[in-house]
Amino acid sequence: MKKNRTIPFHMPHIVNEDIDSMIETVKGAWLTMGPKTFEFEVGIVEYIAARNAVAVNSCTAAMHLSLRVVGVGRDDEVIIPAINFASAGEVCCQEGAMPILADVEKESGNIHINAIEKAISRKTKAIIPVHYGGQPCEMDMILGLTKDKGIYVIEDAAHALPSTYKGRKAGTIGDIGCFSFYATKTLTTGEGGMAVTDNDEWAERMRILRLHGISKDAWKRYSDEGDWYYEIVELGYKYNMTDIQAAIGLAQLKKLEWMWEQRCKIAEKYIEAFAGIEEIGLLTLREDRSTSWHLFPIFLNIEMLKIDRKTFIELLKERGIGTSVHFIPLYRHPFYRKNFNYEAKDFPNSEWFYEREVSLPIYPSLNEEDQDYVIENIIDICKKSRR
Ligand SMILES: *Cc1c(COP(=O)(O)O)cnc(C)c1O
């Protein structure tokens, strides 16, 4: 099979509506955080049925502010999955807290309930589960373990818009949920994030923290409704979203369900195509929840193959197919090796996962022929690489 296509791992779905919405805002009088940002917050709040949303410039910022408002500080412990992006561990360290890595489930890539049980100590102040690829974690069990212990649950819902758990939207189940609108995510504003919570006091404090610890936002300060006066009430950050980002976000929100349906169709096609292929393992999908299909991970049955995951990815690349790996376990990174005493042998499932996982292209503009091309080439490589 010769290379006749180029299929990137990801393509954001930015169409004329998004561009028009952005241009309209850019031509207007207000570019930074203002009315569009607040409209976007309301849009998200209504869509996921939460009480408050605080728009910021990244999911990482949302998680940082979340830790601050629930009161995570020096020498506290925060439990996070080992298969993870940089954000959760990073914000724990920035608050002087200790990230406690927990192993994941092989079947889902989500944090393992037994690993949480083992990791909980008197110092545990929060847990940040990641809804891996979009499929929600065992939230009832997590809440059951943390309830009455003063342990807060902050959902890393960067992959999980829109996902549901027992009929509720992911991000609204724990104490705070954090979404990402980074370029590759299911709804994008280029860069951006949002913290959602039913706790009004936390939301109010996050609004202050996101803009220099100032008690009124700039829009109110300079518009007719406000005045020149403001107060710095605590040490804050420059974490606000801009109206330019929010204008794109509002247009994206209108087609969020449609974009999700497109990814669902692609996922169904992949599932059907790989069902009989022994070299390829798939995620186990749980009945009581739905996934956003932000990622479509496959697991190589490396025992049956002559090649490893790295070579598999290179062969796909030679045929013009872009893929990725989610994620390199945190304990394998130089920063974690230098500063903590984690050992790979304590994370057998994360090691299993990392050795085998490949994320396939899944996004609305991936057409039928592209999907067929990806499927045919994966099956062809498997056949040719059989032991
Ligand atoms: C993308 C991502 C983040 C970070 O999102 P930003 O908006 O880039 O800060 C956090 N967690 C996970 C699991 C992610 O995939």
Image: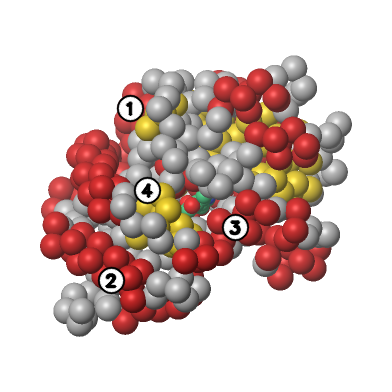
Q: Quadrant of the N terminus?
A: bottom left
Secondary structure under the numbered disc 2 in the rendered image: helix
The disc labelled 4 sits on which kind of residue?
His
Q: Earlier in the sequence, mark 2 or mark 4?
A: 4
Q: Earlier in the sequence, mark 1 or mark 4?
A: 1
Nearer the viewer's eye, disc 2 or disc 4? 2
Marks 1 and 4 close (CB-CB < 8 Å): no
Ligand 1 within 8 Å, label 4 CB = yes
Residue at the disc numbered 1? 47
Tell me the CA gap for discs 1 and 4. Answer: 18 Å
Q: Earlier in the sequence, mark 1 or mark 3?
A: 1
Nearer the viewer's eye, disc 1 or disc 2? 2
Residue at the disc numbered 2? 380
Task: Residue 353: give x, y in percent of width and height.
Answer: 56, 56
Residue at the disc numbered 4? 294
Residue 95 appears anywhere in the view = no
Q: Earlier in the sequence, mark 3 or mark 4?
A: 4
